[in-house]
């Protein structure tokens, strides 16, 4: 059984994701329902995830989704702090606004983000100001689920760039001494610059665009994570209950996000619904609506050296997932040139991802 919510949820009620045989789950479910966190309607955030090891697997991918969301929000925090020159208290107020309504309403990470920005120690100093920029849990062995999520995405051939890119910045952050050495070798860093637009444009409009960009990254993280679960489900035949999975994620867990889970619950009411959420017209509408803001924030971020790996990875994920003219046309030709890896023809049916039937002798051996 996967359990989420951190050490504080042990007292307040965790989100629990049990998998296994139906008869065994029926025996333990009454107890788990009493212990589990409750959603806004009083329903327990626990359910029969599926058979076999599905409960542990879903919790593992939950943590992969969590990493994508955490990175996107951290990137937005730095843009506000260093790019827009907002104080910690001002950022807290902005995150509180995000959490109040709209697409990021009642999102756990946004809620605690506001709290983190406000907290002060006994000397009146913001605690956040003394926190080093190191995430070491992947390296010190205390956190393995994020690593496993990325390995599974690659093994199952699932594009999950919002998740995997978030993991890479965690790894880079852990080796701070090495980063300092590289900085010295480079003769300096590429410093995050103040956003001049904030002086000329409406700051509120920039912040609203940033909110939408974060939402796009959050939703994409869910889409990518659920696609990993879907492929594992097909492989292992766990018969995962996706409606139950969304209920498990409604409270007591790190990825709690009411607007998103309300939408996903509505989609998965139909047990026959396509589990690839990029095939959902509702999801497509949401991501398409957020795309312009995401693109503008990433563009401004690049211009001002903002560190935006997850936000930019989400932008690229949406671009290449919806595009039928990828640069891989040239990539495939290169593979055939030096390795005789074969290719398909544009004039042929698209078919499955299988070895092509054609080779061209680009250069006589």
Image: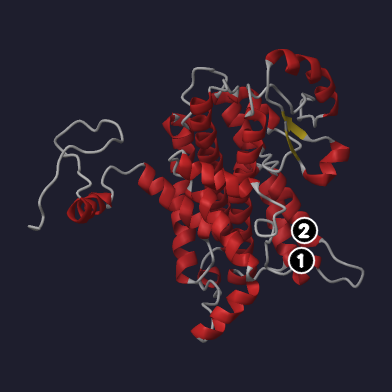
| Quarter of the figure with residue 229 | top right
- Can residue 205 be seen from the camera position used here? no
- Up the image or down, 181 lies above or below 9; here it is below
Front-lying residue, 194 or 134: 134
Q: Which corner quadrant holds the N terminus?
A: top right
Where does label 1 land, which residue? 128
Disc 1 secondary structure class: helix
Q: Which corner quadrant holds the C terminus?
A: bottom left
Front-lying residue, 142 or 215: 142
Whether the residues at callouts 2 and 1 have beta carbons within 8 Å, the answer is: yes
Q: Position of residue 154 (x, y in %)?
A: 47, 45
Identify the disc placed on residue 116: 2
Disc 2 secondary structure class: helix
Q: Position of residue 270 (x, y in %)?
A: 53, 18
Q: How is the image coloured?
A: secondary structure
Identify the disc placed on residue 339: none
Left or right? Give the position of 86 relative to 5. Answer: left
Q: Residue at x 73, y 49 (%)?
A: 111
- Can residue 167 be seen from the camera position used here? yes
- Up the image or down, 14 lies above or below 150; here it is above
């Amino acid at each position: 059984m996967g359990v989420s919510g951190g050490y504080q949820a042990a007292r307040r009620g965790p989100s629990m994701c049990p998998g296994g045989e139906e008869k065994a789950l029926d025996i333990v479910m009454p107890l788990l329902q009493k212990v589990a966190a409750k959603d806004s309607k009083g329903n327990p955030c626990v359910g029969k995830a599926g058979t076999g090891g599905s409960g542990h697997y879903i919790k593992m991918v939950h943590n992969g989704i969590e990493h994508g969301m955490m990175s996107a929000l951290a990137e937005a925090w730095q843009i506000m702090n260093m790019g827009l020159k907002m104080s910690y208290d001002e950022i807290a107020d902005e995150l509180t606004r995000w959490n109040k309504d709209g697409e990021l309403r009642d999102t756990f990470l946004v809620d605690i983000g506001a709290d983190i920005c406000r907290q002060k120690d006994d000397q009146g100093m913001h605690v956040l100001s003394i926190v080093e920029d190191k995430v070491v849990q992947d390296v010190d062995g205390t956190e393995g689920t994020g690593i496993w999520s990325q390995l599974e995405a690659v093994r199952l051939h699932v594009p999950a760039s919002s998740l995997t890119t978030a993991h890479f910045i965690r790894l880079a952050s852990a080796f701070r001494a090495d980063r300092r050495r590289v900085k010295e070798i480079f003769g300096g860093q590429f410093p995050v610059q103040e956003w001049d637009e904030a002086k000329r444009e409406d700051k509120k409009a920039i912040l609203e665009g940033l909110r939408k960009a974060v939402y796009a990254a959050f939703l994409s993280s869910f889409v990518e994570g659920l696609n990993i679960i879907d492929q594992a489900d097909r492989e292992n035949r766990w018969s995962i209950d996706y409606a139950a999975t969304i209920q498990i994620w409604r409270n007591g867990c790190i990825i709690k996000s009411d607007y998103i889970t309300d939408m996903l619950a509505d989609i998965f009411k139909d047990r026959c619904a396509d589990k690839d959420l990029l095939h959902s017209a509702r999801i497509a509408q949401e991501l398409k609506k957020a795309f312009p803001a995401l693109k503008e924030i990433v563009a401004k971020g690049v211009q001002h050296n903002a560190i935006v790996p997850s936000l930019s990875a989400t932008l690229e994920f949406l671009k290449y997932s919806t595009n039928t003219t990828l640069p891989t046309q040239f990539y495939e030709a290169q593979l055939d040139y030096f390795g005789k890896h074969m290719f398909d023809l544009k004039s042929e049916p698209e078919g499955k991802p299988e070895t092509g039937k054609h080779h061209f002798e680009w250069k006589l051996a």
